[in-house]
Image (cartoon, rainbow, N blue to C red):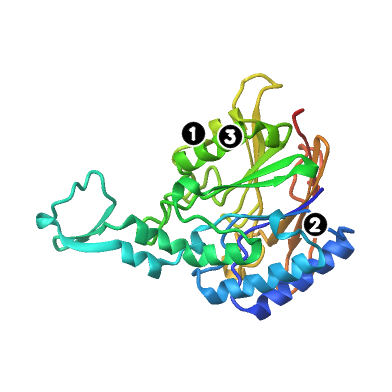
Amino acid sequence: MHLLHISDLHFGTPEDAAACYSALAQDLKNGLDCDRLDALILSGDIGTASTPGEYAAAAVFVKSLTDEFGPDPSGIVMVPGNHDLNFELAEAGYAVHRKKYFKGDLEKLRFMDLGNGYIRVLADEAAHRRRFAHFGNFFEAVTGRAYPLEYDRQGVLCHFPDERLLILGLNSCRRIDEDFPKDADIHANGLSRALDEIRRGADRYGGCRKFAVWHHPVYSTGGDGFKNLGFLEQLAGAGFSVAFHGHIHKDERFLYEYDASPEGRKLRVIGTGTFGAPSTGWWPGVPLQYNFMILDGDRLTIRSRCRRNPNGAWEAACIWRQGPDHDPVSRLEIRLPEI
């Protein structure tokens, strides 16, 4: 099974998307000898300001990819990133009040102190959720499935029965907006609803390997990682073995050990860099990146690729350190637990 993980596309125009696709297609065909993709994982930041024009450009890219390599729309796994929120749409959820006359309970509401006695209060949750609307339209256009705006329904399952694989997409941006840009979080009820569906659907999902994807890293030096890691406990306890993310524009790996024993339950979290951000958005010393993966039985092979020049070609990214006496390599082999 061939899986493609790309993140942080940050597309602007259809012309940019077409150029990015051409370079990727050349690398898949000539650099990786890949003729068919079974799954496409997009871990957020499809756009930059979450405008319809940006998603139109991204749709050009995805359609070109699926037309030539696949997968079918049912094999596209996508989650929003913090740049997939339209802040102009979010404004409808806020109201400005004189603080001393406000009658609500500020202990239970999100608000910003504007100074001079005024506060900005999140007053309409339903209107505030509309900031995901443009992303949701793009999601439906390329996958054929509606993206729920209700946070407790944003644990979206993608099932690959022939490969015995289940991928859970989670929204780590549901608390983020213009006033709270670093509040990464997974909705507890959204996760629980998805795990309940998996458990109750044992006749359908039993015997599947379970992967997850979200946008943010587990930890971040910029303070925009997760504050609460309880969701990792639930995922590892439910048998998830690998997860993917983006956001920080560089590769990253993290091992969450739910059990202390060597053979115990563990969750490997693998991040990739930005696929299409302009060079001003690159992490220092880190070029454009994506990961091509092969799932074969209990072995997951990750082949990391990089693009050192904005208009250059993709090549192997030697990022996986093997020890003090070994050079980094571009291929990471993960042995997955038995199912």
Residue type at mark 1: give it: Gly
Q: Secondary structure at mark 3?
A: helix
What whole-number distance in Å separates the C-alpha atoms at marks 1 and 2? 33 Å
For label 1, count other residues whose C-alpha is less than 10 Å away and answer few (under 14), some (14-19) or many (20+).
few
Q: Which residue is mark 3?
A: 235
Q: CA distance from mark 2 to mark 3?
A: 26 Å
From the viewer's perspective, is the residue at label 1 or at label 2 nearer? 2
Check disc 2 and report the residue beneath it: 37
Please say whether residue 312 is visible from this viewpoint. no
Determine the secondary structure under disc 1: helix
Q: Earlier in the sequence, mark 2 or mark 3?
A: 2
Which residue lies under the disc numbered 1?
Answer: 230
Q: Is residue 315 visible?
A: yes
Residue at position x 75%, y 29% in the image: 339
**Measured from the top left, where is residue 147 in percent x and y?**
54, 57
**In the figure, is residue 51 to the left or right of 58?**
left
Give neighbour class at mark 3: few <14, some 14-19, many 20+ (Cα, 10 Å).
many
Left or right: residue 282 compared with residue 107: right
Relative vertical location of residue 109 with respect to residue 29 in this rendering, above or below: above
